[in-house]
Image: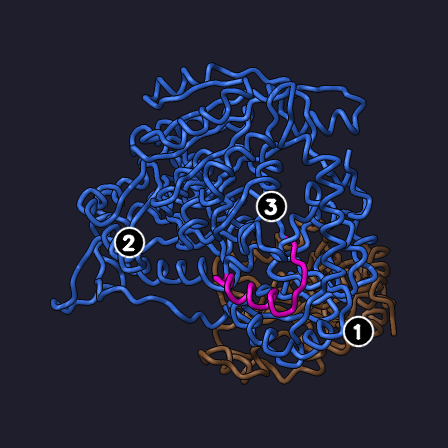
Amino acid sequence: MESKLEKKEFNITVYTENQVGLLSRIAIIFSRRKLNIESLNTSPSEVESIHRFNIVINETEEVVRKVARQLEKQVEVLKVYYNTNEDVIWQELALYKVPTEIIAEHVSVERLLREYGARAVVIRKDYTVFETTGHREETDALVVVLQQYGLIEFVRSARVAIIKASDGFHTKLKQFENREPGEPAAENEYLNNGDKVFTM
Amino acid sequence: MQQKDALLMSSEEETATTVEQLKGSEILLNGLIAEGVDTIFGYPGGAIMPIYDALYDYQDQLKHILVRHEQGATHAAQGYARTSGKVGVVFATSGPGATNLITGLADAQIDSTPMVCITGQVFAHLLGTDAFQETDVINITTPVTKWNYQVTDASEIAEVLAKAFHIAKTGRPGPVLIDITKNAQLQLAAYKGYQKCDHIRSYRPTPIIRNNYIEQAAALINDAKRPFVLFGQGVLLGNAEQEFKAFVEKTGIPAAWTILGAGAIPTDHPLNVGMLGMHGNYGPNVLTNECDVLIAIGMRFDDRVTGRLDKYAKQAKVIHLDIDPAEIDKNVKAHVPVWGDCKETLPLLTVLVKENKHEEWLAKFNNYSKEEFAQCIDAEINPQSGELTMGEVINQLNQLTNGDAVIVTDVGQHQMVACRYAKFNHTRSNITSGGLGTMGFALPAAIGAKFGAPNKTVVAVIGDGGFQMTLQELGTIMQSGIDVKIMILNNQFLGMVRQWQELFHDRRYSFVDITSPDFVALAKSYYIDGKKISERTELKDALKTMLDHKGSYLLEVMVTKENNVFPMVPQGCSVSEIRLK
């Protein structure tokens, strides 16, 4: 078993109500512990009216678990999961703006773009915008290459991640809406996995 | 333009003529009455004027106590909540009125005190424009509230207020703030009666109890040779004093308290072995590191309780009963987590545990207690010569009140002495600022405590430093005519900081020498009687005079200047390294 004290990337998925001010309530739980958020994405979820935050931090599991519980305790947070990179399918999107005249002159650029799976989003006389989607290493690698060809602007989106083992939130939400919830939704994964978390 | 906006009907207005139309401010007050509120601590100002205007017509149902500073309103509401078990309610205006609430909100947040604060806010159309007395109250208060919400339309008020009360008092209680823009207070909206809230889908105040953990806990307790119970305010907040007593008495386990847990069982109960932590009792600290099963009930292992964590109860199996899942494993690893309201979990546990008596183990506590008495307590509470000590004042007070008074303390040496030596026969009698350590807490909190427990004697024990932080609340006492006994223990120093400077900073007394006004004359200027004493021979009579006095009274007791509170677990040390001198 890997050490809980080793820092690594964790993907925190937070299901919430859609409410003004919640972003700041969530963000301060990290900043209070001086944790740097590597990436933060908010979006709708599979369930209408329920929002989903994807937050990436580089920390030990012990700290991540404590943060997850403090997040889950916020009134408008329904559920929090944390997963390692192996537990999720994740993607980030990147945009690259380069001078059209330079790339037009260099055949190798086209080859490079093919190699990195980039697509042209806009082609104008003065500049062209390419897009790639993938893991951090992939989007970063193209930056290094394009620097040589006069990269004007680069931007990368926050990470979005799907949890491999998740059944989604539809049934869970129904349980939450009940006044007397059944065990599956009622609680913490930690309790369900008591043997793994609490060792006698 | 403003006037017109204000008079515009709510967007969700129903056209049906049968539905009653009320102003937002009236909806708010009706809601408060429906929630059973009878006392509000507050201070008016521009942005909350419509609510105060409506309050004018509700004076027979809602008692409003005009404080002298909004911080005082929060502490008074806390004192009220702690003695009465109800939700404390505060009104304040926007801008500085709201920012003055921060200390009280932070205090209530860390000490889990149920409170609902209503702040006025500038008109909705002025939000974000740096309008007069505009401040971003929601963002400022987010870290120090359990929940907060800004209302910009009168139609939201009833529902939001109902949510606020539900959130403030259920689960682990805490402070909630509602910020209401002035237009929403003035606006008319349909009012179909007030509906209390008992369910919010994203909010699960009490976890489902898992029997397997109860069974595991019971098995550990039944096999334990040296079990030890630590209890905190969770027992009081859960109204679980009887359930707690039944559990402790059946199992015969010695039990020690955090300062907010004091009074959950009477001080003189044979299984009550004393106070935990930095200035707690000798036995409970040392024996934490000798017990085999540690049963923590409604407490959160604050660093002032645990001392150095990596040397804290490492030999013990830890059972942690708490309503807040985020507390389990936060500071001390639990072997058995018993999530839930201890009012429900304790009886389940009591059924499964065997009747027992841990006489030998309990005797160990008593032996440490004798040693502590001989080495530090005796000299503190029974000095025969020299200047008065804080301990003897509290001890004398116990004899006169019999342990039936509500003791409200400020923060510092006098607080530790009062918590150590005051006798509590009843629950909800020890009102103090625990987690935040807010100097200036006691005077306003005592006002609220008295409103929350009008039939009790309320004694505020305050240092000369802390008293000067919120002494303007003497004006509130004067105007409301409330009966609060104020006892200033004056050592002419910021004593606790001075103690640390003496012990850890080579006696470099950096800015702890504090001078005071003539407190008795000050009280007189507020038409409050008082007396100052410095002699042992005067003590008993002076305390008696204070307690027998009709109405508020201020007694200033000059105590020895450079006394230290012992025992003490120095910062960074293990609880078993507690020093007796």
Residue beneath label 1, please? A200
Residue B81 vertical placement versus B555 (above, below) = below
Which mark is drawn over residue B28? 2
Left or right of B391, for residue B505: right
Q: Quadrant of the N terminus of chain A?
A: bottom right
Left or right of B270, for residue B193: left
The x and y percentages for residue B494 are: 62, 24
Front of the two marks 1 and 3 = 1
Q: Is disc 1 in the same subunit as disc 2? A: no
Judging depth in this view, the residue of B305 and A147 nearest the camera is B305
User: In the rendered structure, which amino acid carries the disc numbered 1?
Assistant: Met
Tell me the SS state at disc 3. Answer: loop
Q: Is disc 1 in the same subunit as disc 3? A: no
Displayed quadrant of residue B456: top left
Residue beneath label 3, please? B435
Front of the two marks 3 and 2 = 3
Judging depth in this view, the residue of B148 and B307 nearest the camera is B307
Circles 3 and 2: CB atoms closer than 8 Å:
no
Q: Residue at x 67, y 50 (%)?
A: B302
Q: From where the camera sits, is residue B326 visible?
A: yes
Q: Chain A, which colour?
A: brown
User: In the rendered structure, which amino acid carries the disc numbered 3?
Assistant: Gly
Which mark is drawn over residue A172? none
Judging depth in this view, the residue of A32 and B222 nearest the camera is B222
Range of residues picked out in magenta:
B238-256
Left or right of A11, for residue B408: left
What's the distance in space between the residues labelled 1 and 2, CA to CA? 51 Å
Q: Chain B, which colour?
A: blue
Bin the neighbour count of mark 3 within 10 Å (Cα to Cα): few under 14, some 14-19, many 20 and up.
some
